[in-house]
Image: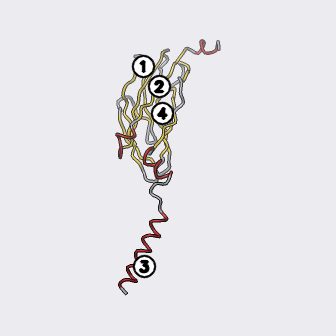
Amino acid sequence: MKNRLFLICLLFIWVACDRVDPYSQEFLEELSNPFEIHHPDGTLYGSTSSSILFVKSEVFSNSSQSMDITWNLLSSEIPRDWELNVCDPVNCWGPEITTKTFTLIPRGDGLLDAGFRPGGVPGEGRALIEVWAVQDSAETYQVIEFNAVAERPEYLLKY
């Protein structure tokens, strides 16, 4: 009886383990790349009369679990009268906020934008934002570069 029970348990474990492939492509991808950032290359051109120029990006989760993502404003170079806001899935944060954490649902996505407010002043703005998964900051660390140029409306009409 003991032998039979032991064999049934062993068979159950073997069948259960055979159904889960710990080295499946999906499992390995999730471990090596828990999130992706989609960010268009280039610079956003707009008018000085715009209240805000949004340079957009999106963060996509490859994980089957909820994931905490942290962003931190590394640097910004903007004209004196400009203002920079960073927008995540929670809020658009004012210039006094330089780091925040938000949660992505499994296989979910969320925005991560830089909002340049030119305030009627022509010029160029640049921001570098670092992003990482809180659960694994060493392996997931990425930097996004955001660029915007605000020109006077009459200059934009010539093109």
What separation in Å lies between label 4 and label 3 (alpha carbons)?
56 Å
Q: How far across and down, in percent of the image, does residue 156 sit?
A: 60, 15
- Is 25 located above or below residue 43 in the figure? below
What separation in Å lies between label 1 and label 4 (alpha carbons)?
16 Å
Q: How far across and down, in percent of the image, does residue 100 sit?
A: 36, 38
What is the number of the mark on residue 8?
3
Dot 4: element: strand
What separation in Å lies between label 2 and label 1 (alpha carbons)?
8 Å
Of 37 and 23, nearer the camera is 23
Please name the amino acid that badge 4 sits on: Asp
Dot 2: element: strand
Mark positioned earlier in the residue sequence (2 or 1): 1
Q: Are marks 2 and 1 in contact (CB under 8 Å)?
A: yes
Please name the residue shown 48% across and 23% down the image.
147
Query: According to the image, label 4 marks what residue?
Result: 113
Please name the amino acid that badge 3 sits on: Ile
Q: Residues within 10 Å of mark 2 (few under 14, many from 20)?
A: many
What separation in Å lies between label 2 and label 3 (alpha carbons)?
65 Å
- Is 136 located above or below residue 8 in the figure? above
Camera-near label (2 vs 4) is: 4
Query: According to the image, label 2 marks what residue?
Result: 116
Query: According to the image, label 1 marks what residue?
Result: 78
Please name the residue shown 44% across and 30% down the image.
144
Q: Residues within 10 Å of mark 1 (few under 14, many from 20)?
A: many
Mark positioned earlier in the residue sequence (2 or 3): 3
